[in-house]
Amino acid sequence: MTDQVGVRIKRLAHGAGLDLPAYATQGAAGMDVVAAEAVELTPGARHAVATGLGLAIPEGFEIQVRPRSGLALKHGIGVPNAPGTIDSDYRGELKIILINHGTEVFAIERGDRIAQLVLAPVVRARWEEVGDLDSTDRGESGFGSTGGHAKLG
């Protein structure tokens, strides 16, 4: 087992009785998080779903919000800004932005698992402005330039 990092969590009043985010299996990278409200997502609709939780993420870390693969495959439910980022200095309620890419209304009930949370280290960039960049074999070739799909041609 890898090292564990403590993350302070506060259950808000409307989160009473709900499971805290948890790893479903020993090898899971993400913790399942549940909804603290019932919502119906019509096709194309987005909603910031309440979790009833507040977090104090340690400095030097973020929590990434990722879709649940089963919801994405079976119902077209995703996280539109995936992975979403919860910054270490945010102290409001954790809400999960969900979108319905499916063709039918999708009902979320209080207590349903709606997304995964992944604790990840953050490395901050320090810009070093230069006049020229080093050259590479790829150079300035962009979108689709490395191949991988015959139709990109």
Image: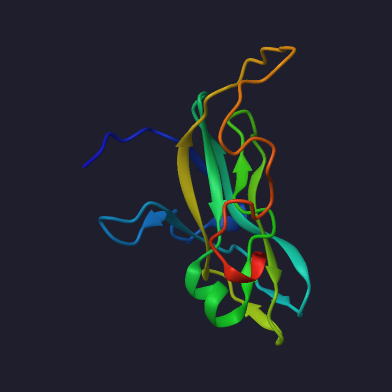
Task: Give the left or right position of residue 48, taking residue 27 as reference.
Answer: right
Q: Position of residue 27 (x, y in %)?
A: 28, 55
Task: Name the residue at 67% across, 40% down.
Answer: 92
Q: Position of residue 111 (x, y in %)?
A: 52, 69
Nearest the viewer among 12 and 48 is 48
Task: Give the left or right position of residue 15, taking residue 42 as reference.
Answer: left
Q: Quadrant of residue 4?
A: top left
Task: Give the left or right position of residue 118, taking residue 54 as reference.
Answer: left
Task: Name the residue at 65% across, 55% down.
Answer: 144
Q: How is the image coloured?
A: rainbow
For the C terminus, the quadrant is bottom right
Q: Position of residue 124 (x, y in %)?
A: 58, 22
Task: Name the residue at 29% across, 61% down.
Answer: 25
Nearest the viewer among 56 and 25 is 25
Work out whether 8 lies above or below 81.
above
Work out whether 57 lies above or below 124.
below
